[in-house]
Amino acid sequence: MERTVILEGKNISRWYQMGEVRVNALQETSFQVYAGEFIVVLGPSGSGKSTMLNAIGGMDKISAGELFYKDQALHKANERALTKYRRRAVGFVFQHYNLMSNLTALENVSLSVEIATNPLRPIDVLQEVGLADRADHFPSQMSGGEQQRVAIARAIAKNPELLLCDEPTGALDFSTGIQVLKLLRKFNTEYNKTVMVITHNASIAEMADRVFYMKDGKLIDIRVIPQPVSPEEVSW
Amino acid sequence: MLWRKLLRDLWSNKAAYFACLVVIVIGLMVYTSVAIVYENIVDAKNRFYFQQNFADGFARVQGMPLSEVDRLERVEGVQLLSARITKDVRVYDPDRQEGIYLRLISVNPEQASTVNHVRVIEGTALKANQDSILVDPAFFQANGLDLGSTITLIVEGKKVELVVAGTGQNPEFVYAMKTSHDLYPAPETFGIAYVPFDTMANMFQSKTLVNDIVFTLRDGYSYLQVEEQLKPLLNKYGLEYIIPREDQLSNVILTQEIASLGATVTTIPIVFLGIAAIVLYIMLRRMVEQQRGQIGTLKAFGYTGTEILFHYLAYGLILGLAGGIIGGLLGIALSYPITVLYQQFFALPDLQGQFSYRYLVFGILLSLAFSIVAAFQGSKGILRLQPAEAMRPAAPPAAKKILLERLPIIWSTLTVQGKMAMRNMFRNKLRSFFILLGIALSFSMMAVSVYFWDVGDLILTEQYTKVQVYDVKVSFATPILQKSAERELWKATGVKQVESMLEVPISLERYWLKKDVVLIGMPADASLYNVIDDNGEKVYLNDNGIYLSNSLADELQINIGSELSFKSPFTKDKTINTYVAGVISQNVGSYAYMKYDYMAELLGQGKIITSALLNINAGDIPLLKEQYLESPIIAGIEDKEQSMRQILELLASFSYTTWILVFFAGACGFAIIYSSSIISLSERQRELASLRVLGMSPKEVFEVLSFEQWVTSFVAMLIGIPLAFAMVAAMAQSIDTDLMSIPVVLAPSTFIYAAIGTIASILVAQYSVYQTINRLSLVDVLKERD
């Protein structure tokens, strides 16, 4: 079966000028991501994982190289085009949820639906993440795991092609972490959407289709997992 | 080291602190400048009144022999008394269209101590029996006179030439208006001239008969005690009025102006400093919350709560000190041009701009007090924080449903951004309230500025299109018979209508209440001069009874139908009884009215009139003036168009003060919106950045903030409307006198202008906020949990 490339990076680099020092956060990295894949990006702190994810998510621009989403050249896109790209194609899940503190769970989900072109029904998505009964609660009235599930609901309700997650389980305990991973996998398989998860928790890698290993701003290895395990089997 | 932190914190929030500083500076600038001007004027007034021996009482009679003066001087309680001849005469100047008048006041050059002593400003003092005069400096300047030049007067039909020996000023004419009917002094067409007594006595047929008496009181005697004794002595000489200093025209206006300056000194700085204090409070409150980790660390090091509190108080200290110094110095600089402006209207020779350390120091202390109190209120929470607690991040801000959500009709129409904005407003109730208050104040200040810009026009338009609808008013030197006057005037070219008018000074009496006013008699079919009611509708006078202005009626505590009596020099001290037929509205002056026939009958002097109103072709006015230029019967010809033009020019020159006020109010609105946005922005940076990541454009994210501001501003403007009415009503109350009252009528256009101004300042503030959102670095904001 011919697989479609949804994302492609060619020799992408990102550096920051800090006074007189140039910090190379990402160096000449190339990769391809196929539609419907579940990818885990592994690496220690400062290895360039987040820099890569930010570039892919259209939140940051690369300093050199080429980065394509389908046939759209993200490295050439201006701020307006990037906004549009984030709006249509990308869903983001953060380590610290970043929910709007004065909106209820349902309203937080509705917020992203309002700007999407082909969204899912907010209450359905909340149902999917198992929080329909907490739709009326504010973030300050929910646990961390619940907040993260709302954040995922918010990201997938837009019905994006690409779901990018930066340490989604980083702030959660084991069992809530598993719940979150199950949701990500469900979105990946049932909706056939691409999911990229950044983590430094190596055991999560076992549920991926492919694993990107990063170190010192470089992609040093890509491993294909022939038989990904189900989220329930992941342990740490 | 903490100082370095402080400076860097100030620098990183420079825009918001700067906005706050601007408000302090404006407040202090207004305070210092107005306080200095106030002091200058009060000093100049007191010194001038004292040195020139300003009278405590003023009386006007028709004519009294000079020999009577001795008897008056002996009245118990009189310190010093001067009897003078006072006459208004026309200046002969064939080149000038308008009528120019001088009020001649006799002076006795040989008497060393007199009441209302004339101060020679320029030139030489007067000498007895010389044909020379001193004129007031404003008239001298406005008419381009030179020392030693000749001025030609028309006195009882004859031309009289007098030499201008110099300029002089007495405290009676600090604000020199011809009649209380006028709104402003017009030095081009009206001035004061001081003439040696003998010279003046020779000019008029009445010779040495004096008509004007001024006197000062001995210590321990009240004006009323003296008035009681003088009145019977003066009545037989046709007493027209006797008034205390408080009612003297020039003094009334000067006193009023000083009072309104005093009110400005106390209110304006409070408003501005209050707004600055609110902004500072909000900023520090937020900073303390944001820096709780740092505060905890400092406490853990061993810094005491008080030390840390002082650190935060220093923010207020720095802002208050900087604002106080800058505002104070700018205010001192501003006081000079304002003083110059006052010099143009108030002829106080001693009025000068002065440097004052005192108000600079006062201003700085005032500013410091406000800032430090605000800083303390904002940061006192530090004292309660425990180090361990402080180092933990604050609990996530709790949110709850707001009252508005119980109204699903409204709530469901809001977008999610709208809901966020509404909840946020109610989450920070105190802050929202302050912002609301600030914008409401800024809006109403703008409305009041616009109102004052409008009201001058309004009064003029009403006065000249509804009340004084004549083209020309001809005043007679002495009362003359109605028939012959009308017959004569009808002969003039271009005359379309002639109407008679009888103006007589009377003193109204009701129980112990007394009031000297001018009574105007108007023909039954009067159409050139109208009396109007509160709604601006013409009032048709009853055949009997007297009509009083609102302020007169208030002062005499009288209602329609009440009995009222009056005396007049025309009735030789006989008391005449009548009743109040109506109370009418009057913006300029304060007069009583009667139907002419009824009035002539009451006075018993036959069908006499004192002036006539004409409708005449504009092109024929110069001819009319020329024709009667030297007439002994006609004392003056007033061209309404011309008076109106003069006043409009004067009003236009005031307009820049309006603009300055509008600018100040706008700056305030800007500072509030800007600093509150900056605060919301830094407080909610993370939320807003997440919205950007979700795919919202900067504009959509900005709408979350701006929606909140528009809702607040809209409500604030609604509150500002009654606030503006209250402010205007309070000002109207303080202005309301016999001379002038201002209507509390705010046109919708006033509020539209104020709204435009407020919206403009909000837009400017929002633009800079929008720029900040546009520059928000998503990666940086989301990277670290603060």
Image (cartoon, helix red, strand yellow):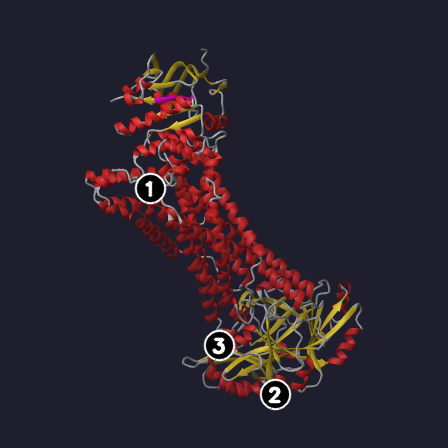
First in sequence: mark 1 vs mark 3: 3
User: Residue B585 or A191: which is nearer the viewer?
Assistant: A191
Residue A46 in picture, x, y percent from top left:
31, 21
Asked which secondary structure carries label 1, the reply is loop
Residue A6 in picture, x, y percent from top left:
45, 17
Please indicate whether residue B256 sits to the left or right of residue A204 in the image. Answer: right
Q: Quadrant of residue B416?
A: top left
The residue located at (71%, 77%) in the rendering is B524
Q: Residues within 10 Å of mark 2 (few under 14, many from 20)?
A: some
Q: Quadrant of the N terminus of chain B?
A: top left
Residue A69 in picture, x, y percent from top left:
46, 19
- For residue A194: magenta? yes
Q: Amino acid at mark 1?
A: Pro
Mark identifier at residue B572: 2
Mark identifier at residue B397: 1
Where are the magenta residues, as a range? A192-197
Whether residue B11 is visible, yes or no, is no
Q: Examine the rendered structure and indicate whether residue B42 appears above or below residue A134.
A: below
Asked which secondary structure carries label 2, the reply is loop
Q: CA distance from mark 1 to mark 3?
A: 69 Å
